[in-house]
Amino acid sequence: MSDFLLLVIFPVMLVLAEGALPEHKSSATAYEIVIPHYLTDQKKQRLTSTDGATQEHREDNVSYSIQIAGRPHILKLKRNKKLISKGFTTYLHRKDGTLNSSKSKTQVNCYYQGFVEGVENSVVALSLCHGLRGVIQVGELQYGIEPLVASFLKEHLLFQLPYLHGEQSACGVSSPDLFHQGNLSAGSTHNMNGFLANQRKMAFRRYKREVLPVTSFVELCIVVDNNRYREKRLNQSLVTQDVLELVNAVDLMFQPLNIKIALIGLVIWSDSNPIEVMDGSAGDVLGRFSAWRGKEKGLKRSDITHLIIGRGSFENGTIGMAYIGTVCSPTLGTSISTVNTAAAVSHASLVAHELGHNLGINHDDTRCNSVYYIMNSII
């Protein structure tokens, strides 16, 4: 029998103390204050190690009780043991073009994936490093959760992530053999349906002949531009945390295809951007980025290199672009996406869409009539 306390939940409407709001405060309008409770057998003890990590962070499978929309739910989570590849390296790209590399000291044993017990089409991707932080998908509703600043009661803010664009937008790709352009209005974000909400549905039967017989590992390198670095207050740890949360969610989306996304490298353009990311079209920026990647010999080889740009959309609402079927190409195995929200994980389905193109996956409009699939051109 599980030993846990009932959740305490207090609905609030933007009356929180200054400094207590989540980073998403610009996009969310209402919050619930919740206290997640770790569920453990009575025989187990809650231990604390010298680095502050609790017992549940050392377990491969954990459960939490939490209230969502006023109803109790249980999150069933499993540790993502292969979130990063062996030899994962962080690079700081300096103004003079040099790369300063270092082995990351960021805690990586506290990223989990799972589902909401008893709820169909539910998916959860969370960091448990310092409280619960990440995304909870329940049906077609997506929630963000993060610790409340300076809370002695381990309170968290739970908030529904809105559809900022307000309407559907279409993919602008004209030739599936060239590249992808995903169109959304400025400041928008994909919802995390698609692979996330539908991974347990029979609709995935269309992928049966495409699912790999054994797990295929894709080593991903994420490049964070200087705009995004400044948005994170020039804090390398915050950028690393942001990227790990993003990749943890993206990896979950590819599980139905037996594809594992693992982070092999993180590059931060710490001084300035070595290419122009604010001028020209998305295609122009993708071309510049691909040329930069091809010339940058100091980076470890990766299967795909993806650039995260801290800005709003390009012309015509384009927020992402990728070369199709170019995985493993040192130059063309590249893609880009724009992020202008505080947490990159809210754009996970956009990044997954672009990586899908890198892997050779085209749009599935003719096979799936739901716009909630990640590879649908109506995004």
Image (cartoon, rainbow, N blue to C red):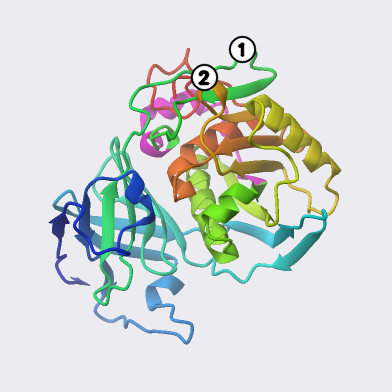
Q: Which of the two residues, 312 or 252, is positioned nearer the viewer here?
A: 312
Is 284 magenta? The answer is no
Q: Which mark is residue 315?
A: none
Q: Which residue is mark 2?
A: 171
Vertical position of residue 173 compared to residue 80: above or below: above
Residue 168 appears at what percent x and percent y?
Answer: 38, 21
Residue at disc 2, secondary structure: loop
Q: Which of the two residues, 358 or 74, is positioned nearer the viewer here?
A: 358
Vertical position of residue 283 compared to residue 243: above or below: above
Q: Which mark is residue 174?
A: 1
Mark 1 nearby-residue class (10 Å; few <14, some 14–19, many ≥20): few
Left or right of 44 in this view: 301: right
Residue at disc 1, secondary structure: loop
Residue 225 appears at what percent x and percent y?
Answer: 64, 47
Left or right of 342 in this view: 319: right
Is residue 289 at all visible to an observer of this figure? yes
Q: Are marks 2 and 1 in contact (CB under 8 Å)?
A: no
Is residue 257 at all visible to an observer of this figure? no
Residue 210 appears at what percent x and percent y?
Answer: 57, 28
Q: Quadrant of the N terminus?
A: bottom left
**Mark 2 vs mark 1, CA separation in Å:** 9 Å
Vertical position of residue 260 compared to residue 257: above or below: below
At x 35%, y 34%, the residue is 164
The residue under label 2 is which amino acid type? Cys
The residue under label 1 is which amino acid type? Ser
The residue segment tinted magenta is 196-218
Residue 133 lies in what quarter of the image?
bottom left
Residue 287 lies in what quarter of the image?
top right
